[in-house]
Image (spheres, rainbow, N blue to C red):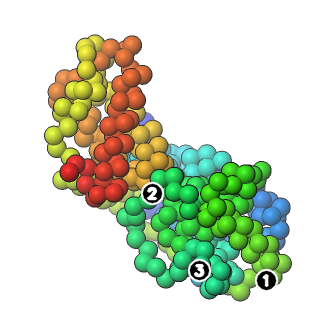
Amino acid sequence: MANVETGFREAHLGGTAIRDLGLAIDGTRLEPIVAAFTEELRRKGLTRLAPRFYLSTEWGVPFGTIAIAIPFYLARPELAAIHAERTGMVEGFDAHDLLRYLRHEMGHVVNYAYKLYERKEWVQAFGAITQPYVEEYRPQPFSKRFVRHLPGWYAQKHPDEDWAETFAVWMTPDHDWRTEYADRPTALAKLELCDRVVGEVAREMPLVTDEELDEDVATLHLSLDEFYRGWETPGGELPPGLDGSLRATFRGSGDRPAALLIRKLESALCTEIYRWTGHFPERTRPLVRHLERRAEALGLNYAAADEPRIVVALTALVTALAMNHVHHGRYLP
């Protein structure tokens, strides 16, 4: 639930068109991070390929371009706070995290700039880029065939993402990927292919230099309220019949409301459950809030000394529900 400060920010900005917020990379916290990333590219020898950075609705690289879109809400702290409140997670919450996403997107840039996806060895390692791109993918946690970089086992989503994640691991400074993936020969072979291919193309001029922008922030006529409308999963998908599970989680007695603890854990649950299961934060947040409402309706309380056990139990409960949904499309059988 929104606190007073966040609620004020939303009321103040919610009706404003995004293009009228005056957003830019220059002069914000993003500027030095982009500069640091550009230096990373130089150190990796990628000096002939200069991506264009711009603000848009989400992270991405339009196919066939070398333009990296950065979510507009990352340009201002209050917008990032609103995004976290509305969706349950911010993809790029600090400098370290922002660089992780930039390395991933740069993988797409290199792929498109040099048309690596047309190479036979690339297709053999990652698959055809023409495979259908689906949002609702079902990852296999800890699969040895893929690297792990972004949350949600993202490399398993599509061959293009598999390559981008592999590139990001390869690009990460001081990352001894040969040692880390020594017991995962398939993933290691992808990294070695990336190392060899990027070493080759880094000396060449890119085949593609298109910088066409997709949903540039300057063209977004939607207001913040309109942009976030519909992000939450409809309430009809929420699982009934969890009262017994909540009672088992908060067994015992005490003077602390269970609903308040669930609310306090919401952000961490959304982020970490996505990281390890692939269950999207915009799904986890309504689920957690459903549990919060049920705990309040049941009048559940707990003792302060029992909180560590309850945090573990609640995390296990939400994770189990999330895994059911990821692999079966529903929370309960």
Tag of residue 36: none
Say left or right for 145 vs 167: left
Which circle's residue, 3 or 1, is located before the other in the chain?
A: 3
- Identify the residue at image location x=67%, y=67%: 189
Q: Is residue 65 visible?
A: no
Q: Is residue 1 above or below residue 100?
A: above
Residue 132 image-quadrant placement? bottom left
Task: Name the front one of labels 1 and 2.
Answer: 2
Amino acid type, residue under disc 3 in the picture: Val
What x and y, as percent, mark residue 225? Answer: 35, 56
- Identify the residue at image location x=68%, y=74%: 110
Circle 3 residue: 123
State the residue in front, 237 or 297: 237
Tag of residue 205: 1
Residue 169 image-quadrant placement? bottom right
- Identify the residue at image location x=35%, y=49%: 323
Image quarter in which the N terminus is found: top left
Circle 2 residue: 140
What x and y, as percent, mark residue 210? Answer: 64, 83
Amino acid type, residue under disc 1 in the picture: Met
| Badge 2 density bin: few <14, some 14–19, many ≥20, Cα 10 Å | some
